[in-house]
């Protein structure tokens, strides 16, 4: 395992199996899972989604790894900035297609669908306002330092919602993005309705959601979803992180806290509403038809009830 970039434990027992050492200004952490890679150097955490063969698509293991990485960032000592990125061809292509197979029989996870053996991405933890799928997005707002998403390739559905959870988004102009959930007969339930509405005008958020259309990174910048575009989003995100890290850390953290006081009003109620509405959609006739029609490459036949 490369000592400069090693996987951080993606487990529901975050203390198990960890071995940490400090060498100079670089922290190295050896772990049992490599779904998310973390390097911390000079106060900057380089957090990489590491499922490149699936374009970093989200399954239960990926949800857990990302949420656990965010929880670590909340307590990481001497941290000044975080950069989120994806290994391989994409930032995150959204929900793994294999997960859709669980929708047809209504067995996909909702608020109450978790089990002790596998909490799943609908699992709630005491004291949180999110379930696991929401937490992989919201946790980056809870991290006390600025979080920058370096977005390339694809950011679809849940992948876009994770990017929206960051404070700043630097996006390649050719990136394909989409609020994709309605295409699959679902709703954006990973804090997406809340975050998107705080970033763009309500009519823009609704148009993107209702149509589920693809749009480019260049258009994302025009709408304000992308902070700016870059042909090298990762390099520019790291450069911005270094600039932020050079400022007073207490002033930067205090500024994020103040902005978040304004942008988090009503979050708990909206997240609960997302969970309620998604539970109504998963396994419904129209939701199953959306998935089956897409896989069969035919027009869907929806009902109005």
Image (tube, rainbow, N blue to C red):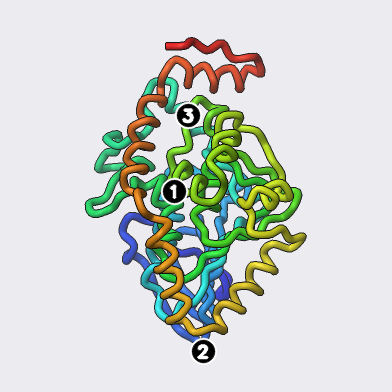
Q: How many marks?
A: 3
Give coordinates of residue 82: x percent, y percent. 52, 68
Disc 1 secondary structure class: helix
Asked if one can make out residue 120 in the rendered structure from this viewpoint, the answer is no
Give coordinates of residue 125: x percent, y percent. 26, 50
Tag 1 near tag 3, CB within 8 Å: no
Where is mark 3, residue-wise? 186
Give coordinates of residue 116: x percent, y percent. 25, 42
Mark 3 is surrounded, within 10 Å at the Cα level, by few (under 14), some (14 to 19) or many (20 or more) other residues, namely many
User: In the image, what residue occupies the spot 54% across and 83% down?
Assistant: 247
Figure quadrant of the N terminus:
bottom right
Disc 3 secondary structure class: loop
Where is mark 2, residue-wise? 24
Identify whether 300 is placed above or below 20: above
Q: Which mark is residue 88?
A: none
User: In the image, what residue occupies the spot 37% across and 47% down?
Assistant: 132
Q: Which mark is residue 63?
A: 1
Upstream in the sequence, badge 2 or badge 3? 2
Identify whether 127 is placed above or below 296: below
Give coordinates of residue 40: x percent, y percent. 51, 75
User: In the image, what residue occupies the spot 61% across and 22% down?
Assistant: 294
Which residue is more in the foreground, 227 or 238? Answer: 227
Question: CA gap, disc 2 to disc 3?
Answer: 48 Å
């Amino acid at each position: 395992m490369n000592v400069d970039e090693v996987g951080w434990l993606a487990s529901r027992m975050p203390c198990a199996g960890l071995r940490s050492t400090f060498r100079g200004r670089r922290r190295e952490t050896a772990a049992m899972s490599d779904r998310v890679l973390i390097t911390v150097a000079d106060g900057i955490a380089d957090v990489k989604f590491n499922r490149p063969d699936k374009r970093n698509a989200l399954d239960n293991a990926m949800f857990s790894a990302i949420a656990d990485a965010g929880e670590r960032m909340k307590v990481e000592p001497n941290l000044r900035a975080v950069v989120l990125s994806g290994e391989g061809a994409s930032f995150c292509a959204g929900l793994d297609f294999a997960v859709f197979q669980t929708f047809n029989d209504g067995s996909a996870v909702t608020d109450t669908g978790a089990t002790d053996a596998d909490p799943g991405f609908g699992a709630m933890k005491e004291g949180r306002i999110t379930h696991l799928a929401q937490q992989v997005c919201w946790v980056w707002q809870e991290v006390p330092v600025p979080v920058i998403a370096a977005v390339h390739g694809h950011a679809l559905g849940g992948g876009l919602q994770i990017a929206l959870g960051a404070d700043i988004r630097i996006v390649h102009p050719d990136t394909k993005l989409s609020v994709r959930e309605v295409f699959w007969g679902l709703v954006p339930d990973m804090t997406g309705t809340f975050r998107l509405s705080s970033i763009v005008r309500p009519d823009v958020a609704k148009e993107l959601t209702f149509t589920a259309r693809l749009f480019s990174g260049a258009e994302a910048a025009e709408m304000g979803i992308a902070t700016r575009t870059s042909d090298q989003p990762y390099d520019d995100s790291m450069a911005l992180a270094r600039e932020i890290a050079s400022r007073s850390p207490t002033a930067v953290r205090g500024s994020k806290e103040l902005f978040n006081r304004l942008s988090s009003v009503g979050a708990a109620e909206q997240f609960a509403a997302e969970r309620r509405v998604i539970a109504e959609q998963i396994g419904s006739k129209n939701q199953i038809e959306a998935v089956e029609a897409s896989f069969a490459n035919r027009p869907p036949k929806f009902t109005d009830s």
